[in-house]
Image: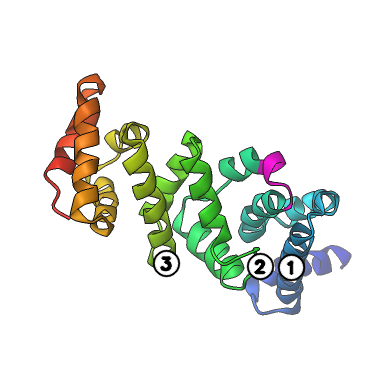
């Protein structure tokens, strides 16, 4: 009889998602999400580290994406590498977890802080962060995609040689979406970009030269 009751409790959340067991789990997730950013805003790294096992055991995607962000807010220099490595690039991770569950609720120091931060790190020369920005733009929309676009254009104007290797291994449809960012440039800046990539063309791979040709033929 005890085994039967145990099995019923085990499968109750699956059979009845609106049950008290499920609500208890959601409440626990929400409570820990709030704690993460309360500790982050006061730079309490020790308290955040104390939640690490809880986050792991709850095994919730939003919490898993929130935890590296909270650590980065608490101590940017110490946790920049982890923040970049674990920054999501899928649509759900970007738009649901970071944007809707965290940024829209103003849990970070300022609105869109997470996306601004990954862009700044990329701008400072971190190639992994740049890859995250490129993939993030492809899988995002709205104001988040616009922020990614701003970062990409800024880096492209300054260091096109950093972006071209990533574009050369992407599919045509992905590249076409990224080229839409050029629409934010005025004709002078876009012409300057074309001139810059012409200068480095001889030292690039065949795949990168194909990307340059596509950009040359793009009309913003």
Circle count: 3
Question: What is the magenta range?
Answer: 74-79
Which mark is first along the chain, 3 or 1?
1
From what the image shows, is residue 25 above or below residue 136? below
Q: CA distance from mark 2 to mark 3?
A: 17 Å
Is residue 103 visible in the rendered structure shown here?
Answer: yes
Q: Which of label 1 and label 3 is nearer to you?
A: 3
Q: Where residue 27 appears, x then y in whole percent?
A: 74, 73
Magenta region includes residue 52 = no
Q: Where residue 191 appears, x then y in whole percent?
A: 18, 45
Q: Which residue is mark 3?
A: 143
Mark 3 residue element? helix
Chief secondary structure of the magenta span? helix
- Mark 2 surroundings: few (<14), some (14-19) or many (≥20) residues within 10 A: many
Q: Where residue 217 appears, x then y in whole percent?
A: 11, 44
Quarter of the rendering containing residue 12: bottom right
């Amino acid at each position: 009889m005890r085994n039967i009751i145990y099995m019923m409790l085990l499968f109750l959340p699956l059979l009845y998602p609106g049950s008290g067991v499920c609500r208890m789990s959601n409440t626990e997730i929400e409570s820990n999400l709030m704690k993460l950013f309360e500790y982050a805003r006061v730079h309490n790294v020790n308290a955040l580290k104390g939640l690490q096992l809880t986050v792991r055991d709850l095994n919730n995607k939003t919490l898993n994406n929130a935890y590296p962000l909270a650590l980065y807010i608490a101590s940017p220099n110490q946790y920049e590498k982890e923040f970049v490595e674990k920054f999501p690039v899928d649509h759900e991770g970007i738009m649901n977890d970071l944007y809707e569950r965290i940024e829209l609720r103003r849990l970070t120091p300022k609105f869109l802080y997470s996306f601004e931060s990954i862009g700044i790190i990329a701008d400072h020369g971190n190639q992994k962060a740049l890859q995250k920005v490129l993939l993030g733009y492809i899988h995002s929309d709205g104001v988040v995609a616009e922020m990614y676009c701003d970062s990409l254009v800024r880096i492209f104007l300054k260091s096109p040689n950093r972006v071209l290797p990533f574009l050369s291994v992407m599919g045509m449809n992905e590249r076409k979406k990224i080229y839409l960012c050029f629409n934010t440039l005025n004709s002078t800046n876009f012409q300057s970009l074309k001139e810059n990539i012409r200068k480095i063309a001889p030292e690039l791979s065949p795949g990168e030269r194909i990307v340059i040709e596509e950009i040359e033929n793009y009309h913003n």
